[in-house]
Amino acid sequence: MALKNYEIVMVFSLANGEEAVEVLKQKFTDLIAKHGTLGNVEEWGKRKLAYPINYENDGYYIVIDFTSDEAFPQELDRVINITDGVLRSLIVAKGE
């Protein structure tokens, strides 16, 4: 099973407060650490969105580097899509 490097950018909703953002961040870092190797976690913090998403103008940005097998990013994307409070996400495979 080959391990690959990935990067994920997530935008969390601020509608439920900063505590909800911390809970989501912890949930996803724990999930990634369980199924792979957690790398750098960058918090870009609260930023204005380019366009409103679900009537929200601001979001909380987090960028996470991780290493996992090739099947995990699909499962991570599935979990993100069914989680309330995540406005947008993008997972990309990083080059060597």
Image: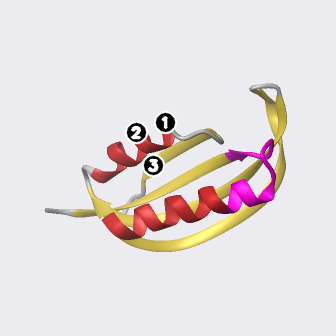
Q: Answer above or below: position of 55 versus 39.
A: above
**At x 78% / y 46%, what residue is drawn?**
16
The colour scheme used to paint the residues is secondary structure
Q: Position of residue 72 (x, y in %)?
A: 30, 52
Horizontally, residue 22 falls left or right of residue 3, namely right
The label on residue 92 is 3
Q: From the viewer's side, name the closer residue of 65 and 14.
A: 14
- In primary-sequence order, the first of circles 3 and 2 is 2
Q: Is residue 9 magenta?
A: no
Inspect the image, locate mark 1, and give the three-letter code of the amino acid beneath it: Ile
Residue that label 1 marks: 82
Horizontally, residue 91 falls left or right of residue 1, namely right
Contact, mark 1 vs mark 2 (Cβ under 8 Å): yes
The residue range painted magenta reads: 12-22
Q: Position of residue 57 (x, y in %)?
A: 86, 35
Category of crowding for the residue at label 1, using alpha-carbon neighbours closer than 10 angstroms: few (below 14), some (14–19), many (at least 20): few
Secondary structure under tag 3 reads strand
CA separation in Å, label 1 and label 2: 7 Å
Most extreme residue toward the left, as rendered? 1
Q: Where is residue 31 in the image (x, y as percent from the top left)?
A: 42, 61
Residue that label 2 marks: 78
Inspect the image, locate mark 3, and give the three-letter code of the amino acid beneath it: Val
Secondary structure under tag 2 reads helix
Horizontally, residue 47 falls left or right of residue 88, namely right
Inspect the image, locate mark 2, and give the three-letter code of the amino acid beneath it: Arg
**At x 62% / y 38%, what residue is drawn?**
88
